[in-house]
């Protein structure tokens, strides 16, 4: 998705430790016009699939998932990272290690919002080591729902997450796959660059 790649090159900031900050347009301040284009692209890429629910993980995936869900005309369910008083009753849980935060979280979805009749598309902003997607996929499996695929806005192709997810047989559609990025020269190379 060239629009996204151009925006990453223009406004993304490469930080030490293979960190790409895109918080000016993707996951802190959100460019809703860009999100609409992202939603249309995921709708196009998954047009051959029956989907009745979008699932993501809090917090930075929620905005994108909402716009994607609007394109599919389906609801969004987001996995919470902590059990709260307003999640009552039975829940599905999974453990997730966050590359960005360097922590392990228990993610939680109330059983009333995910079940065997659901055909789920996972949506998230980043894919690095793949642990968030693996945790979400585990929740879908525990619910007896069907995992249709996963849509990722930015995949770090130089990290193992995408390969691991694909090895598991999960259909993965990433809109921008970064092959390399250099903090010193501020250059980003995408997988399909010529």
Image (cartoon, rainbow, N blue to C red):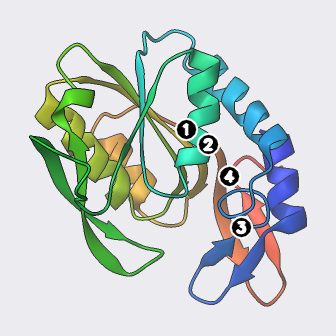
Relative to the observer, which residue lies in front, 91 or 153? 91
Please tell me whether mark 4 or mark 2 is closer to you in this view.
Answer: 2
3D distance between C-alphas at marks 3 and 1: 16 Å
187 lies left or right of 28:
right
Query: CB atoms at circles 3 and 2 under 8 Å apart?
Result: no
Query: CB atoms at circles 2 and 1 under 8 Å apart?
Result: yes
3D distance between C-alphas at marks 3 and 2: 13 Å
Q: Earlier in the sequence, mark 4 or mark 3?
A: 3
Q: Is residue 174 visible?
A: no
Q: Earlier in the sequence, mark 4 or mark 1?
A: 1
Which residue sits at x=23%, y=34%? 140
3D distance between C-alphas at marks 2 and 1: 4 Å
Residue highlighted by disc 1: 65
32 lies left or right of 138:
right
Query: Looking at the picture, does residue 191 appear above or below residue 156?
Result: above
Q: Earlier in the sequence, mark 3 or mark 2?
A: 3
Which residue sits at x=23%, y=51%? 108
- Which element type, helix, strand or loop, lies under badge 2? helix
**Circle 3 Cα neighbour tier, 10 Å, few/some/many (<14 / 14–19 / ≥20):** some
- Residue 164 x, y percent position in the rendering: 33, 52
Residue highlighted by disc 2: 64
Which residue sits at x=33%, y=54%? 80
Q: Earlier in the sequence, mark 3 or mark 1?
A: 3
Q: Earlier in the sequence, mark 4 or mark 2?
A: 2
Please tell me whether mark 4 or mark 1 is closer to you in this view.
Answer: 1
Residue highlighted by disc 3: 23
Residue highlighted by disc 4: 191
Query: Looking at the picture, does residue 11 appear above or below residue 126?
Result: below
**Quarter assignment of residue 90:** top left
Going by the picture, which residue comes out furthest to the left? 90
3D distance between C-alphas at marks 4 and 1: 24 Å
Q: Is residue 145 visible?
A: yes
């Amino acid at each position: 998705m060239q629009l996204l790649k151009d925006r990453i090159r223009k406004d993304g900031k490469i930080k030490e430790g293979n960190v790409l900050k895109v918080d000016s347009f993707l996951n802190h301040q959100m460019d809703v016009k860009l999100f609409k284009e992202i939603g249309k692209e995921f709708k196009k890429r998954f047009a051959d699939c029956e989907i009745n629910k979008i699932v993501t993980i809090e917090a930075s995936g929620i905005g994108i998932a909402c716009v994607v869900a609007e394109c599919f005309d389906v609801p969004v369910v987001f996995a919470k990272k902590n059990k709260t008083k307003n999640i009552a009753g039975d829940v599905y849980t999974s453990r997730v290690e966050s590359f960005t935060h360097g922590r392990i979280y228990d993610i939680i979805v109330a059983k009333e919002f995910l079940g065997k009749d659901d055909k789920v598309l996972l949506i998230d902003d980043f894919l690095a080591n793949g642990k968030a997607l693996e945790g979400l996929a585990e929740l879908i499996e525990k619910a007896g729902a069907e995992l249709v695929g996963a849509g990722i806005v930015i995949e770090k192709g130089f990290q193992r997450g995408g390969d691991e997810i694909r090895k598991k047989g999960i259909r993965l559609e990433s809109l921008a796959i970064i092959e390399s990025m250099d903090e010193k020269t501020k250059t980003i190379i995408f997988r399909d660059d010529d």
